[in-house]
Amino acid sequence: MKVVKNPKELMKILRKEKRSIGFVPTMGALHEGHLSLIRQSCKENEITVVSIFVNPTQFLPGEDFSRYPRKYEADKKICELAGVDYLFMPSVEDIYQKDEVLVKAPKIKGYILEGYNRPGHFDGVLQIVNKLLNIVKPTRAYFGKKDAQQLYLIEKMVENFYMDVEIVPCDIVRESDGLAMSSRNVYLSEEERKRALLLSKSLKRAGKLIMQGEKDVEKIREEMFKVLEKVEIEYIEVVNKNLDKIKSVEKGNSIILVAAKVGNTRFIDNLWI
Ligand code: PAF
């Protein structure tokens, strides 16, 4: 595995590549969730590129940018063992210049749900993903469905900017007790972890109701609110794949989204129906 820091150096190497390129962008502190994306990329492409970059522009003032877990040495080993070909680890100075041309999240879909609670977050996500996709120019890029709105907006950016890449959505990976894998799980104390589990429990409850034939979104939300009594809920919403709110669940075209604060940390989770 070759570790590259400089964007132009990576571009020079990858432009000579004739093989298919799979790309997994991450912010590091790699866990099983990331590994499942990396494994899928290795299976579906001839070479795999992983990036590790804690992107400052997607954190709002007061958010956890400075304490976001950074485990560069452990991450390198994980990537090497997983069969990654190139690990891209630029610094902030390698990536950002002063007074840049900016990519903007769409005014509606970028400012609901996560975007409502973290205004400007998706501008930063799209700015960095745009740069990374241009540097790597992958055949396929892999993103987790846990960040459902991020996935939607990246697919939109690729469509709107005619970018030549296939975006591959990947299933959520969970701990054995149901907690969705996240680099932020390390922030949780034992007691907080129990409360964080309520997010996946509320989605499980929703899933069971739907299996039993319930379609009414208000009834499903009501039951989820009950499960989530002990956490600071930010939102529980049911949307279609276009992120429009819906009143009745439609199989194959509904996502149940939940965001809540546990201790000092926000967590999100969702269920695709
Ligand atoms: O999902 C993430 O880890 C980040 O938002 C991403 C896509 C790597 C951009 O910084």
Image (tube, rainbow, N blue to C red):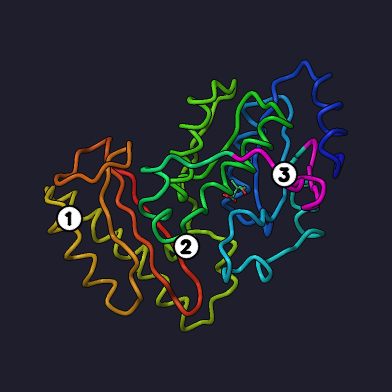
Vertical side of 162 occupied by 266: above or below? below
Magenta stretch: give its range.
85-102
Q: Amino acid at mark 1?
A: Leu
For disc 1, the marked residue is 209
Q: Secondary structure at mark 1?
A: helix
Question: Which residue lies at the image location 50% right of the left edge and 61% below the top edge?
Answer: 175
* Sequence-earlier tag: 1 or 2: 2
Vertical side of 106 occupied by 195: above or below? below
The answer to whether residue 237 is left or right of residue 210 is right
Depth check, mark 2 against mark 3: the one in front is 3
Q: Main secondary structure of the magenta part?
A: loop
Vertical side of 61 occupied by 76: above or below? above
Mark 2: C-beta under 8 Å from nearest atom of ligand 1: no
Q: Secondary structure at mark 3?
A: strand
* Sequence-earlier tag: 3 or 1: 3
The disc at residue 99 is none
Mark 3: C-beta under 8 Å from nearest atom of ligand 1: yes
Q: Amino acid at mark 2?
A: Ser
Residue extending farthest bottom: 191
For disc 2, the marked residue is 176
The answer to which of 47 and 132 lies nearer the viewer is: 132
For disc 3, the marked residue is 51
Residue contact at pointers 3 and 1, CB within 8 angstroms:
no
Depth check, mark 1 against mark 2: the one in front is 1
The answer to which of 47 and 56 lies nearer the viewer is: 56
